Amino acid sequence: MADVGVRPARRADAGAVAEIQVRAWRQGYARLLPAPALERVTSAEAQDAWRERWTQAIVEPPSPRHRLLVAVSSELVVGFAAHGPAEDADLDAATAAELLTLLVDPLHARAGHGSRLLAATVDLLREDGFGTLVSWAFEGDDVLRRFLGSAGWAPDGTARDLDMGEPVRQIRLHTDITPQG
């Protein structure tokens, strides 16, 4: 088996993270987002902008509690997860965190990288004193909803519509990450 793991992202990882994001979105969101919106957020120009944003997130995160992790296989970045304090007005940012994104390169899917990223995220958030973890998912994203559901996540009843040329519904999922024992 290849050498696999999760580590904090480095500046040099930003390009790979942006490439994975675009590849994963093109494959996973093709039936979830309007085609013009998907093209806009996965174009070459968008990928350059994502690379710059991820570089910024790595070198100057908004707070010490914001992190970008990468999954690696034989030193190749194959996935990533970003998290930070929850920003939704109905949540307490001192105790609730948000999984901002978790994506695995479609070329390396179903090899445990997503589970490793999620476990590492939860471990770090527990160390930071968080007890609740939330994430937004497209209502029709059955893959993400099944993945998080298998880890104990459930909808919390909150939803929102994103304007992507037409409304696209998202639901908020949550889980308790309070250490058991």
Image (cartoon, rainbow, N blue to C red):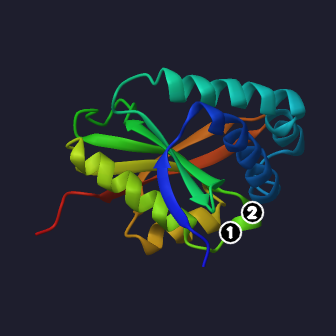
From this view, report whether residue 165 is shown above or below residue 105.
above
Task: Classify residue 15 as left or right of residue 40.
Answer: left
As drawn, the residue found furthest toward the left would be 181
Q: Residue at x 58, y 63 (%)?
A: 144
Which of the 4 image quarters holds residue 31? bottom right
The amino acid on which the numbered mark 2 sits, given as a three-letter code, is: Pro
Q: CA distance from mark 2 to mark 1?
A: 5 Å
SS assignment at label 2: helix
Callout count? 2
Residue 85 at x, y percent in the picture = 35, 34
Q: Which residue is mark 1?
A: 109
Nearer to the camera, 36 or 76 = 76
Residue 10 lies, in percent from the top left, at 55, 36
Query: Secondary structure beneath disc 1?
Result: loop
Q: Is residue 103 left or right of residue 43?
A: left
The reply to whether dot 2 and dot 1 touch (C-beta < 8 Å) is yes
Circle 2 residues within 10 Å: few <14, some 14–19, many ≥20: some
* Residue 43, visible in the rendered structure: yes
Q: Which residue is mark 2?
A: 106
Mark 1: amino acid: Ala
Q: Position of residue 140 (x, y in %)?
A: 66, 60
Specify the quadrant of the image occupied by residue 46. top right
